[in-house]
Image: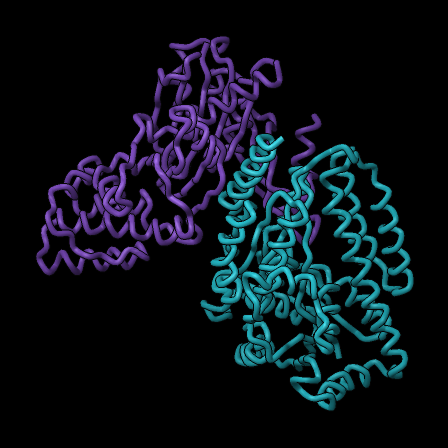
Amino acid sequence: MKVTFPHLGNVYMAAKIFLDDLGLDYVIPPLSNPKALEIGAMYSPEEICLPYKIMIGNYIQALEQGADTIIMAGSCGPCRLGEYCELQKNLLKNIGYNVTFITLDVPKDIGKEELLNRIGILMNASGKSSYEGIQALIKGIKAMYLVDEIEKEVYWRAGYEVHKGDCKKILYRYRQDVFATNNPNKALVILKKYLKQIKQVEIDKNKDPLKISIIGEIYTVIESFSNLYIQERLMDYGVSSLRMLTPSWWIKDLIGKTVKLNSIGIRRASKEYLSVGIGGHARECIGEAVLAAKNGQDGAIQLFPVGCMPEIVSKAILPTISKDKNFPIMTLVMDEMTGESGYITRIEAFLDLLERRKLKVV
Amino acid sequence: MYYLGIDVGSVSTDVVLLNEEMEVIEKIYLRTKGKPIQTIQEAFSLLKGRYKDEEIQAVGTTGSGRGMAGFLVGADAIKNEITAHAVAALELDHEVRTILEIGGQDSKIITLKDGIVTDFAMNTVCAAGTGSFLDRQAERLEIPIEQFGHYALQSQTPVRIAGRCAVFAESDMIHKQQLGYPPSDIIRGLSEALVRNYLNNVAKGKEIASKIFFQGGVAANIGIKTAFEKALGTEVIVPKYHDVMGSIGVAIIAKEAVEKRKGKTKFKGFTIAQSKFVSNSFECKDCANRCEIIQVLENGVEISCFGDRCGKWSEKVAVS
């Protein structure tokens, strides 16, 4: 058995550590790229959301390298992403790939037994005990937290760095170094080293850079290929950016959900504008916008793929928040277009708007 | 002493020369025809004999081709068209609150308050209702685009045309035309559909307060202007130089940039009209990102390289 999985930002680093520790054979698909999107768009239904298409491209590029089993998360949730696994299973079968899908879902939806069954398939292939399995999982989760922590620091410190490009260099270097090793323990050491390094980057605390929150649909904000690398781009402009939705946030939210103690801050903040969950992460988007205004950010950028229904609802609510809180919010809708000029124009104009506002207030 | 503004858009390239009073003394409007470099060279060869390089105090570029144009001419400011349009409108009238801008491929709305931009939006994934579409319809009906607007005014009863999608709007127009409606009614219907689409799509959720400026190439179309006035129930002002507001704005921004720097302009001179520019593109295979790198050579010397994410190519030129 050779497993693979779709990309979601930097999850692949943590997944690699987990799979290395478990001793499973795996293929990590090439990082999401234009070719993957092209393949995905060719086979996918035209109207389906962008993440679906990119994922299909990930799968096929991995299958070409010998993968035969796909691990994917599913949910009986009210957003289409929860149904991807079933649709994708059929799609791949129809175009002639013989693959096994292992869909991981919460016990509430598929039953505890079924979940253990599915995990059992992986465990059997690895030949490890369940204790070792849990150990590997803990390492993977630890790695996810470290990765998210490093990136959070990188994107935030970029606005304050004394030597332009310091943060970006660390960002690229740590990804390369972690990926180069197949030893999970060594990988964790490397991650810790870089976390320390990023915290020591020389910064100028007197600087007052523009601070922007990245909000919106979870896949689009995390998978940087799908948002045309917005946070890296903001680093080039010397802007600090903040994103609350991360894979480690998602893990925490999932666990918290079982006892209804998930993301209390965000839920409370969204209450005035959207008091019920309407699917996807629309409520989170609204809550984050309110929090961003409250925490003194200069503005927020909402991202979502064409046709994302939960985010279309939040898009309609955002202007009211923007008006009430006197807080600029821009929406960018992502699609298959990789021509970047219109996109850059909007970002630059938004930064101009924020900057001119700021100067006027001072 | 003059200030030069260049707007390299999808359809047209506009070059303006402002004097010290920020008045337009020269205005060149050329079709880009997919060749931005040659178009700028063409514009410069028109200006070359009449103005000296030393008379240019600042130069700025805007429009979707602003980056490339900036390298080419040695721009003091390279600015996005939204800011450029806002600056130009504010120079004319500080009380402007809304700018409706419709160009060749895109349309935007900008809202302002107390002289600063407070919000803006651009059309997202659809070009329905932009200049190119009108151009095409004018061509199909064999009516010169300049007279397109006047036709609309002659109509007493507009025909309803679906404005959401350019392709289906065209089918709708053909259908109505085959039923025997006169061209003027169809054109008026089209103008109203375009305005409806703009207000429901680009301007959705935006506050449209007066004074309202209407800018961009399409503002020349009196039919669209009238349709806007009818839909908004208030006066819409079309500035005299509505079609080159982007260039005017960026010339002003460039002037400010040079003054702020207290330096001299980086303008390379009108002689670039004679230079030989070649651009190559290739895919960088050094990592999985597979960036498409574009390299511009002037008389065989590399002057600019961009398109990479890591900075390996673009920084190389910046350093040398």
Instruction: Determine which quarter of the picture holds residue A20.
Output: bottom right
User: Residue placed at 54% from the left, 61% from the top?
Assistant: A273
User: Residue placed at 55% from the left, 66% from the top?
Assistant: A53
Q: Nearer the viewer, residue B154 or B172?
A: B154
Q: Is residue A338 visible?
A: no
Residue B157: image location, x then y, percent:
12, 51
Chain B hue?
Answer: purple
Residue B71: image location, x then y, percent:
55, 27
Chain A hue?
Answer: cyan
Is residue A112 positioned above or below A152 on the image?
below
Taking A145 as reference, is A304 left or right?
left
Residue B158: image location, x then y, percent:
15, 52
Residue B279: image location, x then y, percent:
53, 34
Taking A288 as reference, is B133 left or right?
left
Is residue A283 positioned above or below A130 on the image?
above
Which residue in the rendered view is the most extreme toward the bottom?
A113
Instruction: Determine which quarter of the picture holds residue A110.
Output: bottom right
Instruction: Determine which quarter of the picture holds residue A145.
Output: bottom right
User: Residue placed at 60% from the left, 77% from the top?
Assistant: A85
Q: Nearer the viewer, residue B174 or A293?
A: A293
Q: Nearer the viewer, residue A227 or A205?
A: A205
Is residue B235 positioned above or below B93 on the image?
below
